[in-house]
Image: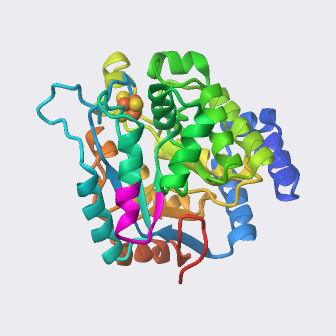
Amino acid sequence: MIQVEEETADILEKSLSGERLTKEEAYELMLSDSLFSIGQAADILREKRCGADVSYVVNRNINFTNICQGSCKFCAYKVGRGSKSGFLMSPDTIQRLCKEAVESGATEICIQGGLHPEIDIDYYADILEAAKSKCEVHIHAFSPMEVFYMAEKSGLGAKETLALLKEKGLDSMPGTAAEIFDQEVREIICPEKISADEWIDIVKTAHRLGVPTTATMLYGHIERPEHRVNHLEILRNIQDETEGFTEFVPLSFIHYNTHLKSLYPNLHGASGLDDLRTYAISRLFLDNFRNIQASWVKLGKKLAQVALSYGANDLGGTIMDESISRAAGQKVDVLDEAEMRSLIAGAEKRPLKRNTLYQHLD
Ligand code: SF4
């Protein structure tokens, strides 16, 4: 007989009956010993929403520069301006990569990069135009941090910057750079990054302009359970207001080569169980998000498969290239569409090809 703590059982029952959980209840679940039951409840809610379908997108990631003037301590990707390994792609290179990807079946190009001191809004506009000029493809590009950076440099406001990017071909944005919204934690892990309020403002502005975004949370570093819950509540509130998020992607911190790891040698990232708990609670708490994405890049393929029974209903993209998690020490394999489908089928779910906006393509 499986034992479930009484308080956990009450919260799960409430969630399964369709009632919205409070922050306090989500916090209780974070501390509960009944992970298996939390996962079961999340799986039931996932199934109610999505049936047996687990979606994925055929896409390509393009990280156009690794030169960055930022100083995020969890980031092993960036290099300084004078570094021998530094690079900046030309719009022509990006155009070629997009064309290649589309020819091999990609429907989405995801473009993000470092905050290169020598690029300005014209460069970002040029790469959008280049990406769109030779092929029809959905451009999912630029974190709120990058939008803030180009707005600052150009002297335009966030709204004008986003409107310009949209005009040049931006279709949607990754909701990266959210990290964890608690300001004290941000001051340690990414002191120069936009504040939580700035992130929220840019994302809401994008949604109002008709540019949907994803939502993310970086966890498994120095944050505490209450920070995760507060973060989820902020996302849920934004979604209530704008309905502009396409999905939530919990991002498990990869610690190996990071400065944060040297500052906190005992940091080992979230455990597999903690990953599953975070996925399951996200499904239970974010009642206004249809899609919770298991990042196979962060979790590894096998744990990502398990996450599909802990609330996740999407396995993300085939991505073709990945450099950010790899730089942080994660062993990132290649994943083609056939393997993506096989991973989903192996998790006893039905693979479903989608586009960025979750329209089915199968
Ligand atoms: S996370 Fe982004 S902004 Fe921060 S240092 Fe890395 S590349 Fe730069």
From the viewer's perspective, tell me whether residue 247 is left or right of residue 168.
Answer: right
Percent from the top left, x then y, of residue 185? 54, 20
| Picture quadrant of residue 274 | top right
Residue 166 is left or right of residue 30, and the answer is: left
Looking at the picture, does residue 100 appear above or below residue 155? Answer: below
Circle count: 0
| Left or right: 109, with 173 as reference point | left
Quadrant assignment for ligand 1? top left
Q: Residue at x 67, y 27 (%)?
A: 226
Nearest the viewer among 286 and 29 is: 286
Work out whether residue 60 can be spotted: no
Does residue 146 lie above or below 311 as drawn?
above
Residue 151 within the magenta-colored segment of the rendering: no
Q: Is residue 354 visible?
A: yes
Question: Which color scheme did the rendering employ for the protein?
Answer: rainbow
Provide residue 85's location: percent of width, then percent of height: 14, 36
